Amino acid sequence: MATSCEDSNTPVDQVVAGTERGAVLRTANLVSNELPIGDASAGFSVELEVQDEENGALVSSVDVYVGFRDNTDEVGPGTDVEETLFGSVEASTFTTGPFGLPRFSYTATLSEMLAHVGRTEADITGGDQFTIRFELVLIDGRRYSFADNTGTLTGSFFSSPFLYTPTVTCPVSSDSFVGEYLIEQISAEIDGPTLSTGTVVTLEVGETSVARVFQTANYPLYCSALRDFTIELICGEINIPNQNSGCACGDGGDWFTNPTVKETYDPEDDSVFLVTFTDDTQADCASPAQTTYRFTKQ
């Protein structure tokens, strides 16, 4: 790992600069982004806000596309389904949000999405994902969606991913894998530890019922700011969602993501477990490496 790492910041004041008469679809509230197996009420739900140069007046509608990603070998391997048009939201149904901009809420149930992609609940298992992509349709016919995103549109207040990937999960008790844990790096270090090894961190339930979040200094020899680190307990496997370490070499950024081989967990025993992730996925400071930490409940 190069020694020029430093805390990185994401600019938010250039979000709409250079996007003449374009439009942004901001995530105001991600209500539900997980699909627990066996839960009849499972579904995806989000509240979105429309932003453009004329306070939403340039948008005529929002098209919604749904597809399916099969991410497991055990059930239905190779059964990905390309996205197709799922529905459309007309601008006439928008309401006015607290910032004076148009808003709307959108919900898609698991049963509706299964029917759309031609699958049944028996065809899915933990780790599979549905893709839900929103596309802004402007009154002059232009369209804006995920492919038009820039880095400044996907974080902070201007969270505008356009694309969501709700994951099929297995229920995890809210009092499991929470509390104080000693974290220890048990893989080889690359110019120092990756997280704050040897410290006690507090795991809490994250944005979904299967997410667990704790704070740590990433690459603590170079960057001291505490950052959230998220893991997901997906039906017996520990998933690492893509996340920015907040520490960078030069103008790049060091990212964490899923490992080559995921660790497993016992839903009945949260006393000790391992977390492995790919370190510096984008090779900003060094070559990507597999990093493993042991979590021991205190």
Image (cartoon, helix red, strand yellow):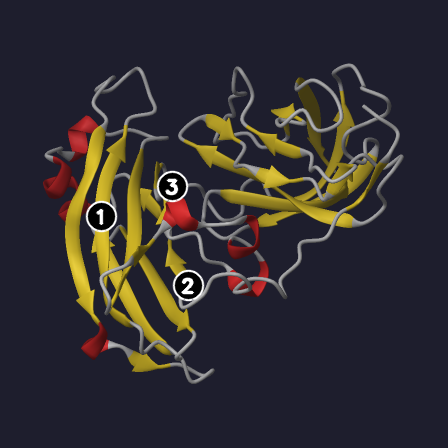
Q: Amino acid at mark 1?
A: Tyr
Q: Which residue is disc 3 drawn over?
A: 171
Q: Residue at x 22, y 44 (%)?
A: 66
Taking 175 as reference, is 122 left or right? left
Q: Is residue 195 above or below residue 216?
A: above
Q: Which residue is disc 2 drawn over?
A: 24
Give SS at disc 1: strand
Q: Nearer the viewer, residue 43 or 93?
A: 93
Taking 289 as reference, is 250 left or right? right
Numbered mark located on residue 65 in the image: 1
Q: Amino acid at mark 3?
A: Pro
Give SS at disc 2: strand
| Percent coordinates x, y for residue 167 in the rendering | 36, 39
Numbered mark located on residue 161 in the image: none
Taking 117 as reference, is 156 left or right? right
Tell which circle, 3 or 1, labels the residue nearer the N-terminal end. Answer: 1
Q: Nearer the viewer, mark 2 or mark 1?
A: 2
Q: Nearer the viewer, mark 3 or mark 2?
A: 2
